[in-house]
Image (tube, helix red, strand yellow):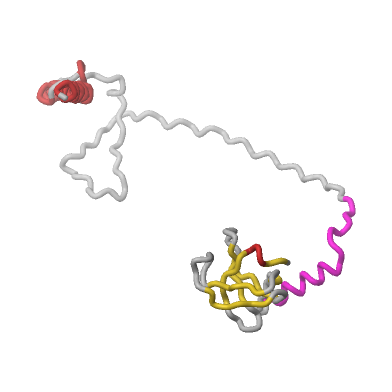
Amino acid sequence: MNRFVFLSFLFMGWAFYELSGGADFVPASARLEAEAESASKPEPSPRATTSRAPVFVEGSNTAPDPSRTRLVLGNTPPEPAPEPVAAPEPTPEPEPVETAEVAPAAPIADVVLSLAALDSISDGTFPAPAKDIRIIDGTLVNIRSGPGIDYPVILQLQGGTEVEVLEDPGTGWIRMQNPESREMGWISANLLRQ
């Protein structure tokens, strides 16, 4: 445990050394002194002979202070001439494409039927989905309140009775509804046929 603590402190010390600049570290006081010395000794620049007008940014929070702004008179470099812009080339007209006559994909009766379905949708009425109707295969079948034999029997139906499948989660039990009495319950999937 002591080694782990020692190695942790060693790692943190190395990380601090690297993040603070490592061997190139310069204390803030030395940096400030170097900046002050460089500000007091102006370096000659090759652009010192050309002057530029002061630039003020529109929309800035401060207005230019006339007492601190100095106007420099002298030769200003000429502005470069704008480069000539080439005129855009006209785009060629696309050539007409020959098309072959295509046979209809669906018979006309199917298209008329689908148009009728679209009309009913635009009227606000939707076609009812097809119901999944299955037949009970057995003599007397128990309908339960939940998907499993642990749930109580709520209804018994005779073999050959048609029921509507409401939900088939794929667990071996199907949620159904008796179309005559509108009672709902769960039945084993093995006891139904299509």
**Quadrant in the rendering for residue 163:** bottom right
Return the x and y of residue 42 as percentages of the image width and height: 18, 21
Magenta segment: does it hold 102? yes
Q: Can the viewer see residue 39 in this picture?
A: no
Q: Which residue is found at the position 58% from the left and 80% from the top?
A: 183
Q: Nearer the viewer, residue 35 or 79?
A: 35
Q: Quadrant of residue 4?
A: top left
Q: Give whichever of 12, 92 is nearer the camera.
A: 12
Residue 54 is at least partly visible in this image: yes
The span picked out in magenta is 100-122
Residue 151 lies, with reference to residue 53, above or below; the image says: below
Viewport quadrant of the N terminus: top left
The single residue placed furthest to the bottom in the displayed view is 181
Q: Residue at coordinates 87% horizontally, 64% vertically from top-left?
A: 107
Residue 85 higher or lower than 27, as above or below: below
- Name the side, left or right, on which 57 lies relative to 180: left
Q: Position of residue 26 (x, y in %)?
A: 16, 20
Residue 67 magenta-drawn?
no
Q: Pick whichever, 94 or 163, lies toward us.
A: 163
At a point 50% along the width and 34% down the height, the residue shown is: 82
